[in-house]
Image: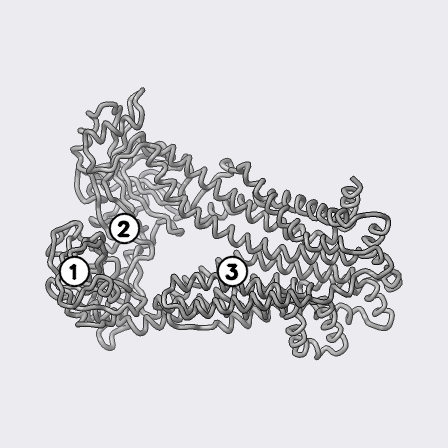
Amino acid sequence: MTVLKTSMRNFVAHKGRMALSAIAVLLSVAFVCGTLVFTDTTNATFDKLFASTASDVTVSPKGVSDKDTRQGRIRSLPGAELAQLKRVDGVKSVTGDVTSQSVTAADRNDNSIGSDTGAPTIGTNWDPTEKRSVEITSGHAPRGPTEIMVDADTAKNKKLGLGDEVRIIAIPGEFRAKIVGIATFQVTNPGATLIFMDTDTAQRKLLGAAGVYSSYSLTAQAGVSHDQLKKNVVADLGTGVKVQTKAESSKEAEDDIGSFLDVMKYAMLGFAGIAVLVGIFLIVNTFSMLVAQRTREIGLMRAIGSSRKQINRSVLIEALLLGVVGSILGVLGGVGLAVGLMKIMGSAGLHLSTDQLTVKPTTPIVGVGIGVVVTVIAAYIPARRAGKISPMAALRDAGTPADAKSGWIRGAIGTLLTAGGAASLVVAGNADKAVDGSMFLGLGVVLTLIGFIVIGPLLAGLVVRVLATVVLRIFGPVGRLAERNALRNPRRTGATGAALMIGLALVACLSVVGSSMVASATDELDKSVGADFIVQSDTGQPITKGIADAVHGAKGLKHVSEAKDIEGTKITLPDGKTVTKGLSAASPTYAEDLRTPVVEGDLAAAYGKDAMSVPEGFAKDHKVKRGDTLTVDFKEGRTAKLTVAAITSDDVSLDKGAMYLNIATVERYVPAKMIPADVMMLAQAKDGQEKQAYASLKAQLHHYPSVKVRDQTDYKQEVKDQVGQLLNLVYGLLALAIIVAVLGVVNTLALSVVERTREIGLMRAIGVSRRQMRRMIRLESVVIALFGALLGLGLGMGWGTTAQKLLALEGLKTLEIPWPTIITVFIGSAVVGLIAALVPAFRAARMNVLNAIATE
C-alpha cells in the first residue's frame, strides 16, 4: 500500500513532466480507436443498408462481374421468366429490375453529374423496390422516354432542379431527358449517382432491348422461408441463373465493401503502430530522465528500507497510471476522430449518420490495453535501472555517470543487427525474382531499423560531432556548449533521434520508390509508346460506339487504334493442356502505337488472319514455339485455330504478358453483340498536325465526360499526379508518428532543462545572457533533430534503392533519388528542432538565478 501511495504522490508531483508522454499515448490510442470505430460504423451502416434493400430472393444472370461494366457487356434475363417466376410455389410477388453502371450522365454544359469520388453512376428503373431506400420528395416518378428522376444529393451537389435537361450516355446509345422528380435517400447514401427511368425506357436505353431485365426481386409468401423459396426457384429455372437469398445477397455486398474497408483499416492501424513504436522512445526517455533526476530520492528510500522490487514496482505503477490516463483520453479522442472522418466522408458524398456510431466493447478494451501495455513495457528498463540504485546514491547529485556511456555489448549487438540487415538488403537487391527478393527486403528493413535503434547511442557520439563541426561551431562558445549537452548522454540523444528517424526513414524510402516509379513510367512511355494521343476512361466506363465514332471523326489523324480485352478465353496448347487466359484484341496499327519488343517473329504478323502472339514467359512455361497452332475457345463465341506469329519480350512494363491478335479475328468467331467495348484508343497525328489533331480530339470528345484524351505530356503528368497523391496520403498518415517524435524532442529538452536547473543557474551567474541560454537550448535541439533526420534519410534511401531494384524486375528500371525532397526534409528537420525548443528554451532563460543555484 505504501508503494502505491508513493507512486500516486510521485505521479501527481511530476504530472507536468509526464504530460507530453501522456499526449503521445493519447494520440496513438486515438488513432487506433478512431480507425476501429470508423470502420465498425461504416460496416454497420452498410449492413443495415443492404439488409433493408435486399429482396427475399434475387435472380440474376450468372457470371456477372465488374469487368462487364468496364468492357461494355450487357447481361440480361428474358422477360418471359417474369411470368414464370410468378407461378413458382411460395412467391408472393415478383419485380423486374433494370440496372446498369455503364452509364454517364452530363448536364447542358457537358459536365458529368456523377460522383467526384469514383462512386458509380447507376441508371435504373423506378419500381416498388426502390421505395425501400428512397422517397420522392419533389416532382413525380418518370412516365416516359423523355423523363428521368435523380437523387437529392446529386441534385444538390450538381445544382440540378426540376426541368433541367440531362444527357444519358449508355452502351446502346445516348438520349436526352428532363428531370421531373427528385428522390431523397431514407437510408445511407453510398455516394452513387442514381438516375431513375420508367421500366420500358430503362430496358431499351440501358439494356438495348424491350422486355428484358437485369434481375428479378422475389417476395416470399407468409410462412415460406427464403431458403425454401430459393430451392423452388432453382427447381423451376434450373442452374443457368444466379439465385440468392436475402442473407446471401447482403453478405456478398457486405464482403465487397468489407474488403475495401479492411484494406483501409489495416493500413491505418499500421501507421498507428508506427506512432506507437515512436511513442515508446518518448516514454523510455521520460522515465529514464525522471529516474535520473530522483536518484537521491530513490537512494534515500533504499536507505530507509525500500527494496529493489518496491522501487521497481513504484516506477511501473507510475507508468501504469500514465498509460491508463492517456489511454482513456485516447479512446474518447478516437471517437471524436471517427466522427471527424465521417464528416469528411460526408463531404465526399458518402453520408454516414452519427446515429449509427458503433463503438464495440472490444474497441476501448483494445485501446486501453495497447496504451497500458506499451507504456508499462517502455518503462520497464528505467524501472529496473531505478531498482539498482544503491542507498549511497542519497549522498550524490542527481544522475549517474554511467548514464552517459553505452555498453560495448549494446554496440556489438547493434552492429551485428545492422550488418545482418545490410546483407539482407544486398541479397534482395540481387534477387532474380521480385517475390523472393521482397522477403529479404522486409527482413533487411526490420534488422537495419532495430540495428540503428540499438546502435544509436554510439552513432550519436560520432554523428553529432560531425554535425556540430558544420552547424554549431560557427556560434562560438554557445555552440560548443550545445554540442556537449547533446553528447552528455548519448543514450538519451540516440533514443530521441531514433524516434524521429523512424518516420523520416519511411518518408525517404517512399519518396525514392515514388520518384523511381514516375521516372520509370516516363522512360517507358518515351521508349514504348509511339502514339501521340491516348483516349481512355478514368472511372472504368466503357468506350461506347459514340465515343469511338467521335475519335475516328477527329481531323489531322494519321490513324486510330482500338484495343479490347477478351476475357475468359480457353487456350488448348500443342501438348493438349488447356489454360484460361485473357487476350488483347487490337487494330493492326496498335503495333506501331505500342512498340512491344519481340524475341521471335514480327509483331505485325500477329495481327494477320487467324494469327496471334504469346509472351516470352508463357512460351517457355508451356513450350510454345513460333509457328505452333493454338486452339482458342472464345467464351462468348466459337473455337478458332490461331497460329503463333510472334513471341513478345517480357522485359517491358506496359502490357506485360499480353497476347495480341487482330480485332477482325475476334469478329470472325464472336457474335457482334458479345464483342466487348474498347478499353482504350490510341491515335497518331499526321506529320506537322499534332496541335490541330489534339484540339480536334478535345473538341470531339467534349460531349463525352466519361473519357479523357491525353497527349504524352498529359499522360506523364497524370502518372506523376497519381503517385504524388498516394505519397501525400501516406505522408499525411506518417505525420502522426513524426508529431509524436517531435513531442519526444520537446519532452527531452524540457526534462533536460529541469535536470540542469542548477547548472543553468550557475551559467547565468557567470555571465551567460538569456539570449545565449535560449540559443544554446535551440542549437541542442537542432543538432538532435538533424541527427535523427540524417539517420532516417540515409536508412530510408537505402531501403528505397533496394525496393527499386525489385521493381526493376517488374519493368520499372529507372532509379531516381528525389534530392529536392530529401534536402527539404533535412532542412525541415532543423526547423522542427527550432520549434520544438521554443518552450524549453524560454523556460531555461527565464529561471531565477538564485533559486536555480539553490536547487538540489
Residue 458, given in percent of the width and then of the height, sits at: 65, 69
- The span from disc 2 to disc 1 (Cα, nearest Å) is 19 Å
Left or right, 126 with respect to 762, comes to left
For marks 2 and 1, the one nearer the N-term is 2
Residue sitting nearer the eye, 463 or 225 = 463
Q: Residue at x 44, y 40 (%)?
A: 43
Residue under label 1, please give it. Answer: 663
The residue at which mark 3 appears reads as 731
Instruction: Tell me, yes or no, whether the two marked residues, 1 and 3, touch with CB atoms within 8 Å.
Output: no
Quadrant the C terminus occupies? bottom right
Query: Mark 3: few, some, or many residues within 10 Å (few <14, many ≥20)?
Result: some
Say which amino acid is labelled 3.
Tyr
The percent position of residue 45, horizontal first and vertical second, equals 44, 38
The Cα–Cα distance between marks 3 and 2, rounded to whole angstroms, is: 32 Å
Task: Choose the circle earlier in sequence order: 3 or 2.
Answer: 2
User: What amino acid is labelled 2 in the image?
Assistant: Lys
Secondary structure at numbered mark 2: helix
Circle 3 — which element? helix
What amino acid type is highlighted by mark number 1? Ile
Whether tag 3 and tag 2 are in contact, CB under 8 A, the answer is no
In the rendered view, tell whether residue 377 sits above or below residue 815: above
**Quadrant in the picture for residue 448:** bottom right
Give the residue at mark 2.
67
Q: Secondary structure at mark 1?
A: helix
In the shown orientation, is residue 65 left or right of residue 451?
Answer: left
Query: Which residue is at the front of the view, 556 or 853?
Result: 853
Q: Earlier in the sequence, mark 1 or mark 3?
A: 1
Q: Position of residue 705 (x, y in %)?
A: 31, 56
The N terminus lies in which quarter of the figure? top right
Answer few, some or many: residues within 10 Å of disc 1's Cα (few below 14, many 20 plus, some between 14 and 19): some
